[in-house]
Amino acid sequence: MTVRAFFILLTAGLVVGLAGCGDAASVPQGVASSPARTPSDKPSLTPSPSLSPTPSSSPTPPVPSGNVVDLSCQDQHGTNRDLRIYPGPKGPPDFSEAWALKLTSCNVVNNFYENKVKPLSPLENAVYKASEGDDDDISFQYEECASVDPDDEATEPGFSVSEEDIPQMTATLKLCSNHPQAAKWRGALKRGQRDVTLEREGRIFDDGTYRVGKDIKPGTYITRDVAGCYWERQNRNGGTIDNYFVNGAKRVQVTIRSSDYGFHTEGCGTWHPA
């Protein structure tokens, strides 16, 4: 073999060997290669925040501001007036239109509650509680508050609200504390409350026979505008210590002593402390 032929064979062998090395390092056919991962491709260990639904809060129902009340009224001239009373901007009903008309009497004509006014607002419930009623109705207070009657006896000087009417008057003043006659109503109410206290103490009394010191208190008493009035102070045996009879008088006075045993009165009306 010549030197030149040997060199050609050696070169061919080197080429074949290098090609075989390249095939060994290559990926076999049909096998997919996985891309190399970089540090940024690592899965995150921080959990993704979960979206929890915001709890839905149900709206607070509005507090009723009061009734809308229809009234049929008469003014001082006898003219019929129909009007509607609306709740005021701060809760109390607005009677200003009724007061401007100088209505002397009113009647509720609401048909929904059969001519009744059922308390709705906190104020109306307080009015109903003060009235001590038992029929869930405050129509009387609406009728009284809408009226401005110049002949209302509760506005007369010295008038006292009776014990049974004290709750109704108290409730009316709660509903319309700024009524044009409110000051006179409060005076009559205060006198009525005072009279209840005095009566329980035995210092206000009507016709009857009383034990002094037990049923009634000794003291000086007066009664007014009487007709056919008779009174009698008695001793322990029922005998008469002193007595008095008058057909009619504007004012009658008597002093009951602590030494008296009994006191009898008839036709004299109500006795009050002088």
Image: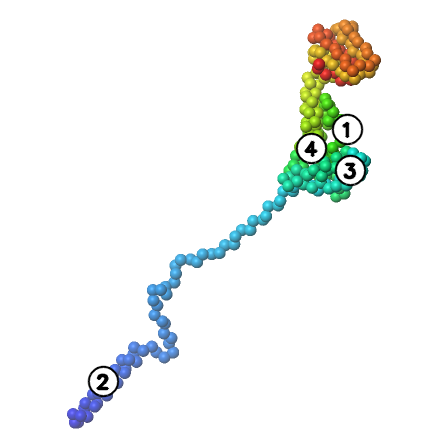
Amino acid on which the number 4 mark rests in the picture: His
- Label of residue 179 in the image: 4
Which dot, 1 or 2, sits closer to the camera? 1
Label 2, residues with CA under 10 Å away: few <14, some 14-19, many ≥20: few
Closer to the chain start, of discs 1 and 3, is 3
Closer to the chain start, of discs 2 and 3, is 2
Tell me how far mark 3 sits from mark 4, CA to CA. Answer: 17 Å
- Which residue lies at the image location 77% right of the left edge and 13% below the top edge? 252
* Front one among 55 and 163: 163
**Kind of element beneath mark 1:** loop
Which dot, 2 or 4, sits closer to the camera? 4
Q: Residue 245: give x, y in percent of width and height.
A: 81, 10
Which dot, 2 or 3, sits closer to the camera? 3
Q: Label 1, on which residue?
A: 151
- Which residue lies at the image location 37% right of the left edge and 65% below the top edge? 41
* Front one among 255 and 266: 255
Contact (Cβ within 8 Å) of mark 1 with mark 3: no
Q: Label 2, on which residue?
A: 14
Amino acid on which the number 3 mark rests in the picture: Cys
Tell me how far mark 2 sits from mark 4, CA to CA. Answer: 124 Å
The reply to whether residue 82 is visible in this rendering is yes
The reply to whether residue 66 is visible in this rendering is no
Tell me how far mark 1 sits from mark 2, CA to CA. Answer: 139 Å
Q: Label 3, on which residue?
A: 73
